Structures are given as C-alpha cells and as structure tokens.
Image (cartoon, helix red, strand yellow):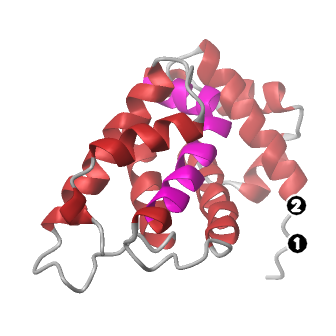
Amino acid sequence: MHQPPEDSHLKNQIVDGFFIELSEHPFSEIRVAQLIKSAGVARASYYRNFESIEDILDYYLDRLIVEHRSHSDQIPNARSWTKQSIKDQLLDLFTVFGAEQERFKLLIQGELSSHIYEFFQAVSEEGSIKRPASWPTGYPRDVFSGAVFQVIMSWIQKGTKESPEEMVDFLIEYLPEKLFEQ
C-alpha cells in the first residue's frame, strides 16, 4: 500500500494538541477524541500519522533530536574534550532545553521525565559528547552527563531564570579540570 507523504505541519498540529491536553489532563487520561479536537484535525488525519498517543511524544522528541543534530554539526571541534568544546556543546544543550522548557515542564509534571532523559541521552551522544580516548572507562562521562542532566532539569523546574550562557559558565566552573583534555 502506498503511504501518503509525511505532513509535518499536520503532525506538529497534533503535537500541539497533545501538549494542550497534557496541560489539562494527566497523560493516562488523554483520549484521542479530545486530542484531535484540541489539535483541530480529523480523526483520519490523526490515525494516518500516529498509531498511539505515545507515538506523538516519540515524534516530538525525534524531531528535536534531528534539529539538535543540525545545530551540533556546526560546533567546531565537537569531538574534543577541551573546555571550549565542552562549553560550546553545553550551550547548545541548554539552548535546546531552554527553548522547550514549557513542554518539558509539562512532561515532568505528567511523570514523563524518563522521556526527557532518553532525549538528553540521545542529544548528548548525537552531539558527539563522547568519552575521550584517555579515559579508561565510560564512568567519567557518566558522571558528567548525569550531573549535566540534573542541572538542566533543576534549571527547567526553577523557571530557567538564568541564561543558557550563565548555566554553562556555572557548570564549567564546577567541573573538575581532569575532565578536560589539555
């Protein structure tokens, strides 16, 4: 069977409807009938694009990963662990998370923060925040990514009062020097 071309505008409308519903109802209570009403789309359009409500969340986060990848490809020396390279990569992460803060707050309130963590893992790996060859295991990277994730989540929950640049400067100041390549 021939699939119609993907309509990203329609999918984005459905994503918008999903977040409207998530702002008003717990995730477990979101129903397709109300979601399509909030999105302003026909039931057939919904089912042509998504099989389930979880697919909407997956699409939204996958789209963010693709957008992030195009930004992170612009970061010079993204595979190195110099202070400047890590600063640039962290700024990119904080910018992405800051831009999506309202939606991420809804995911946190809806007890869907595990999806945010999966997104974080994907963008940090896609953004080439890899373990330097000098590290014997991935544990320092795990410490780094765990700390960064917790700081980002706290920043979002507190309303992103500081700029992404201020948050990056804060993190860089508190990260141990041995994390960076000299």
Q: Quadrant of residue 64?
A: bottom right
Compared to 53, does 74 lie above or below? below
Residue 153 x %, y %: 41, 33
- Few, some or many C-alpha atoms within 10 Å of disc 1 (few <14, some 14-19, many ≥20)? few
Residue 75 x %, y %: 62, 71
The residue indicated by pointer 2 is 7
Q: Quadrant of residue 5?
A: bottom right
* Whether residue 110 is visible: no
The residue indicated by pointer 1 is 4
Lateral position of residue 115 relative to residue 134, left or right = right
Q: Nearer the viewer, mark 2 or mark 1?
A: 2
Q: In which quadrant is the C terminus drawn?
A: bottom left
At mark 2, the secondary structure is loop
What distance separates the C-alpha of mark 2 from that of mark 1? 8 Å
Q: What span is in magenta?
A: 86-108
Seen at 82% across and 76% down, the residue is: 3
**In the foreground, 178 or 42:** 178
Seen at 89% across and 52% down, the residue is: 9
Q: In which quadrant is the N terminus drawn?
A: bottom right
Q: Residue furthest bottom?
A: 133
Give amino acid for label 1: Pro
Q: Residue furthest left?
A: 136
Q: Check if mark 2's residue and mark 1's residue have beta carbons within 8 Å.
A: yes
**In the foreground, 103 or 136:** 136
